[in-house]
Amino acid sequence: MKLTILGSGTCIPSLKRQAPGYVVKIGKDLILLDSGEGTKRRLMEVGIHPNSIDYILYTHTHVDHVAELPALLWGYMYDTQPRKKDLVIVGPKGFKRFFRQIIKLFSPLFYKRSKFKTSIKEISNSKIKGNGWRILSKPMCKQGNTFLPHSVAYRLETKRKSLVYAGDMRYDYPKSLIKLAYNTELLLIESAVPNQRQVPDHLTPSRAGEIATLANVKKLILTHFYPPCEKYDIKKQAQKTYKGPIVLAKDLMRIEI
């Protein structure tokens, strides 16, 4: 299992960090986790053509996590070598309705022009099985001020390895995250603001470290950094509550699990 960080930033423009996007390779399968602005370009930079993605998993529908979805669909239709292999797109409760709106607004000819089958799945406490791997999910904090308030976190696992990815969290995170991430090899989680700038709807480094400790996580990767994070020692703040290995995500970083 291999994780590649496509975007470790937020909705705030940055020359250093793109919006959230991650790709996991398990065997021959490629799984995209969220697709903020710049995802297609980052995929190409790491040698992955968007046509080769097998699954796309969305945690929630804040624009910085889904903005590239219409662009991906458009490219699948009009590429000089149009996509042919089937695609599975997964999201939380209500995602099918959200996807229909995307098609209606941006790609009304998608189903007529596309040369592959697209399966849209909604999941909550759910399981998806693949070739030698599976994906588990649990509902997370509801997201305010968005078309679709529901959100989920994902656990990708083989017989020997696992990775858990959660999107935006509230500072008072749900206990379901601890259960999902328990004993995982790697927890990829947001740490959007430093301890000194705590807000209700994002995690701080110390809070993310607390989650990792309670879940007995073997390695913690912090990501989704707003610009103020660059001015603080984020890793040191997380070490106050988690004593295991900590990695600060960078765009184009690759991690073997």
Image: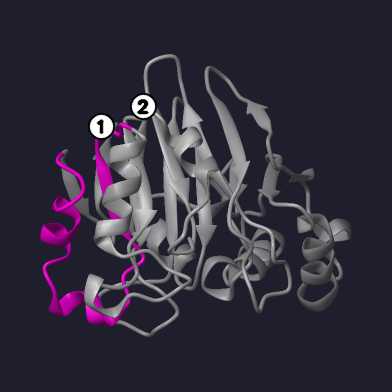
Q: Is residue 116 magenta?
A: no
Q: Are marks 2 and 1 in contact (CB under 8 Å)?
A: yes
Query: Can residue 84 be seen from the camera position used here?
Result: no
The colour scheme used here is one colour
Stretch of the chain drawn in magenta: 216-243
Question: Helix, strand, or loop for circle 2?
Answer: loop
| Residue positioned most to the bottom | 13
Tag shown at residue 218: 1
Q: To which residue does mark 2 refer?
A: 183
Which is nearer the N-term, disc 2 or disc 1? 2
The residue under the point 44% across, 59% down is 21
Is residue 74 depicted above or below 215 in this figure?
below
| Residue positioned most to the top | 159
Query: Can residue 113 be seen from the camera position used here?
Result: yes
The three-letter amino acid code for the residue at tag 1 is Lys
Badge 1: few (under 14), some or many (20 or more) residues near its Cα, within 10 Å? some
Question: Helix, strand, or loop for circle 1?
Answer: loop
The residue under the point 62% across, 67% down is 143
